């Protein structure tokens, strides 16, 4: 089954062009990282999964088929995430499609959120970070590297519903503004606003009770970005993981579809505003995958259920417009922070375990 799926994902397309740097030669002036918590590579690269549609986790398979079904995995994934595949995959790089033998892996051995985001933002794995309740991250993060540069200091903000994000990047150490958990004591730039969002919070329809409200995260982020024009932003969407754990495949897919719509809205705004237009690096990734086989393992992610393989996509100044990387080689999530540091022209603190930048991206950079 898996083998068939992987073979069916292989489409004739030009090989990744390792030398072709495109776009402006200068460094990006802004960095926006968007994470889709727990959205696994199977749907990201392959669209709707038949065995999930037939499982007890899918409640309205005919409606999902109507909205996102297709004859090929490429078309199905595009119907779920049209901005990703029509825009990012054409103007930037997408890594991790196992159909080409190109696996993008977590280096950390835990496969859940805090260790996943810490690896993403620190450029290396600290095995002591083994719980979601872990204290403020003692390790040097990409946000620390950016805060050391006057271009970015005091102009960084993060948004999410999960209150671990400020601890993961250690916002207190690098002065990053944060809005998490829809609580009135965060998001210091807009103190009056979270109260409004708390009012809205009670209003979604009952079928979405317990949903993690990405729409509020996004609206608040857009409002903040529009008002304060930060140079570095992380938006952490959560509903994909939430609906995985709660066993709702329909909502899991629809959450990814909405997250993609938010990305398009954000990018359209970016390309409309002089401070951001053609100066912004956009990175989209996830913190972990999910289990696959048997089908029950999809609901969760850890050493027992699976979830080591992930994916990452980016576009913007300095990133080659190379599409899906098609070389059979492994890349690692810990390589993302050193890559972004190189693209933004800042320095990660030297450490014997610090990962190397991603070659598919940096090769383009070196040719400029
Ligand atoms: Zn989870």
Image (cartoon, rainbow, N blue to C red):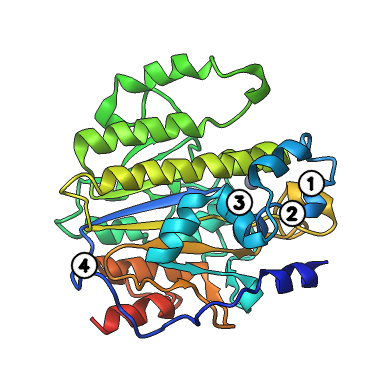
Helix, strand, or loop for circle 1? helix
Tag shown at residue 53: 1
Q: Which of marks 3 and 4 is nearer the N terminus?
A: 4
The residue depicted at 52 percent of the width and 39 percent of the height is 258
Helix, strand, or loop for circle 3? loop
Tag shown at residue 49: 2
Dot in front, 4 or 2 = 2
Q: In which quarter of the image is the N terminus?
A: bottom right
Helix, strand, or loop for circle 2? loop
On whether ligand 1 comes within 8 Å of the CB at mark 1, the answer is: no
Q: Mark 4 points at which residue?
A: 27
Tags 2 and 1 in contact by the CB under 8 Å rule?
Answer: yes
The residue depicted at 61 percent of the width and 50 percent of the height is 38
Image position, residue 96 (x, y; %)? 56, 69
Q: Earlier in the sequence, mark 3 or mark 2?
A: 3
Tags 3 and 4 in contact by the CB under 8 Å rule?
Answer: no
Tags 1 and 4 in contact by the CB under 8 Å rule?
Answer: no
On whether ligand 1 comes within 8 Å of the CB at mark 3, the answer is: no
Image position, residue 8 (x, y; %)? 72, 70
Q: Name the residue under label 3.
A: 39
Occupied quadrant, residue 139: bottom left
Dot in front, 1 or 4 = 1
Q: Which of marks 4 and 2 is nearer the N terminus?
A: 4
Tell me if residue 47 can be seen.
yes
């Amino acid at each position: 089954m898996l083998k068939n799926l992987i073979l069916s994902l292989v489409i004739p397309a030009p090989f990744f062009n390792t030398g072709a740097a495109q776009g402006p030669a200068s460094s990006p002036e802004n960095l926006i990282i968007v994470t889709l918590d727990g959205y696994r590579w199977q749907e990201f690269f392959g669209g709707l999964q038949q065995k999930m549609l037939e499982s007890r986790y899918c409640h309205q398979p005919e409606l999902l088929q109507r909205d996102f079904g297709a004859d090929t995995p490429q078309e199905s994934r595009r119907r779920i995430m049209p901005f990703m595949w029509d825009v990012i995959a054409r103007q930037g790089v997408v890594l991790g499609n196992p159909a080409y033998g190109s696996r993008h892996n977590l280096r950390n051995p835990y496969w859940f959120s805090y260790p996943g985001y810490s690896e993403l933002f620190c450029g290396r794995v600290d095995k002591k970070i083994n719980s979601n309740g872990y204290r403020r991250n003692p390790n040097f993060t990409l946000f620390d590297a950016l805060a050391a540069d006057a271009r970015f200091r005091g102009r960084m903000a993060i948004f999410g519903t999960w209150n671990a994000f400020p601890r993961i990047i250690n916002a207190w150490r690098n002065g990053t503004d944060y809005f998490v958990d829809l609580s009135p004591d965060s998001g210091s730039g807009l103190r009056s606003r979270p109260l409004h969002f708390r009012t809205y919070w009670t209003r979604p329809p009952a079928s979405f009770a317990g949903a993690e409200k990405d729409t509020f995260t996004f609206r608040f982020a857009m409002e903040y970005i529009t008002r304060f024009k930060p140079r570095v932003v992380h938006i952490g969407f959560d509903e994909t993981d939430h609906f995985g754990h709660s066993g709702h495949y329909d909502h899991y897919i629809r959450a990814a579809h909405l997250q993609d719509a938010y990305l398009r809205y954000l990018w359209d705004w970016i390309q409309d505003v002089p401070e951001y237009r053609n100066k912004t690096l956009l990175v989209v990734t996830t913190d972990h995958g999910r289990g696959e086989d048997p089908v029950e393992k999809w609901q969760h992610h850890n050493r027992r259920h699976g979830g080591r393989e992930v994916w990452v996509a980016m576009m913007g100044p300095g990133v080659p417009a190379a599409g899906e990387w098609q070389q059979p080689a492994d890349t690692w999530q810990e390589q993302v922070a050193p890559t972004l540091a190189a693209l933004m022209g800042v320095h990660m603190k030297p450490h014997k375990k610090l990962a190397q930048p991603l070659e598919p991206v940096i090769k383009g950079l070196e040719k400029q």
